[in-house]
Image (cartoon, rainbow, N blue to C red):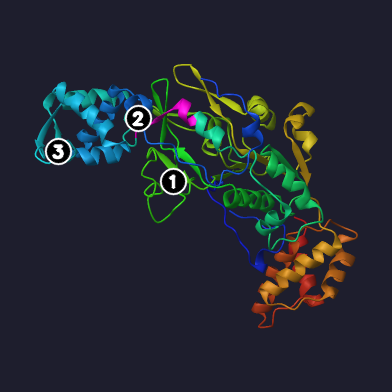
Amino acid sequence: MTINSQLDSPRSAAASFAGERTTGAAPPEHSEETEFGAAQSSLPAPRRPESLAESGLTVAQVADLCIKLLYLNGGLCGHDVAAELKLPFSLAGEALRFLKEQRCVEVVSGAVVGPISQRFLLTELGRVRARDVFEQCRYVGPAPVPLSAYIEQCRLQTVIGVDCSLTTLRRSFEGLVLRDGLLEELGPAVCSGRSIFLHGPPGNGKTIIAKRLADYLTTHGGEIYVPYAVCADESIITLFDPSLHRPGDADADPNSAEPEADRRWRRIRRPVIVTAGELTLEMLDLRFHAASGYYSAPLHIKANGGVFLIDDFGRQLVRPEELLNRWILPLEERIDYLTLTTGKKIAVPFEQLIVFSTNLEPRTLVDDAFLRRIRHKISVDAPSREVFSRILEGCCRAGGAEFTSDAVDYLFSQHYNCQRLPRASDPRDLLEIAASICRFRGQTVSLSEPVLAEAARRLFCEV
């Protein structure tokens, strides 16, 4: 599965061609402030709950998490229980007192120092109850946040309104040779936070352009917060995914410097999730773990606040019509509806920048009704001769080969003017083949006509 959680940011001349490919209750209506607000570079963390009511949880819910922790660990002190649940001890302690009153736990040490240092063990009744709780749900970890809190936070950290200017955008596209005017088309698309449709022949950089857009958002959009898990209709849905979400501070707990923060939330860079031909409709629904009794959020929900790139659109396992029908409402209303195993539907935010990238003719994939919902359609066409020459020059510089305009003249006279369209990836590919030929023959890497002719024959050979 080609799903990338975060974007590499190549800045060397080796990346100086656009054909580079690397290898992932109903929400409230938008307000004017949300739609057109500034970038959330200093978005405050969700505040630490001071009571169970503020946490959105009941004492029974927290007690169930406590009892499962104690069952798996044999016994823990109060401080460790609170740390595992990411809750203040005052809240975890309330659940532990409840379990003690129910004769499910007993205190074996630490009474002199205080409840936070007391060590709690399960009684026989507690072990029986723990097994019953595990039968219903095997989730053990940070306490979930209520769905309503997740909805509110997603609206605060939406991609809509992230600041973007031509000057800052150029920095994220440094090292790429693009046609004139392309950044001027991409900039408003980033500012809108709406969907983007990149289309054009293969090998001209649609994928890397999409990823550089994502790089821009992660760099200039500020960090956001994602909960470890969400509680909806008594069900737990895990959201934070360490394989897809990169913490804001890789060297420490990102909330360690925020004593007032709710530690059930993780501060991360805006996520970038890339999927290609392996995408199926099932990947866009809640995944229920029958043996464990809880859910995992689908990919596009994990992308909330960031970018969801569907590469090679039209070549997925699911038919384009089915995928587009699935997303007509979310694209229009920025709300998606997910179905629990009970049949109940829950409304969740659809707050990411969706990028469709395809080398197929758009109108063979989608109808006008869907194209209307994709706000920005941007063509990434074959490079002009001048752009092609600049790309080749940059690749030669990076590869230690001498650039000559004769190489460009040869390629256009023998191939591009009469047989095929140039691709932005051709300079890189031709130079790699030429370098291999020269190394095999013990020669200095060059783009002499004989070497270039052989490289072109290998690359352009019809199969």
Find out whether residue 144 is within the magenta segment: yes
Disc 1 versus disc 2: nearer the observer: 1
Residue 134 at least partly seen? yes
- Indicate whether 134 appears above or below 160: above
Residue 120 shows which numbered tag? none
Give the percent coordinates (x, y) of residue 205: 71, 54
Tell me residue 111's x, y (percent). 10, 37
Precedes in sequence: disc 2 or disc 3? 3
Query: Vertical placement of 453 versus 375: above or below?
Result: below
Which one is nearer the viewer's eye here, 195 or 33?
A: 33
What residue is disc 2 on? 292
Is 205 inside the magenta-drawn segment?
no
Q: Can you tell which mark lies on residue 242?
A: 1
Looking at the figure, which quarter contains the C terminus? bottom right
Secondary structure type for disc 1 = loop
Q: Secondary structure at mark 3?
A: loop
Between disc 3 and disc 1, the foreground one is: 3
What amino acid is at disc 3?
Gly
Which picture quadrant has residue 47? top left
Q: Amino acid at mark 2?
A: Ser
Quadrant of the rendered image containing residue 384: bottom right
Magenta residue span? 143-150
Q: Residue at x 73, y 67 (%)?
A: 430
Disc 2 crowd rating (10 Å Cα; few below 14, some 14-19, many 20+) is few
Which quarter of the picture shows residue 364?
top right
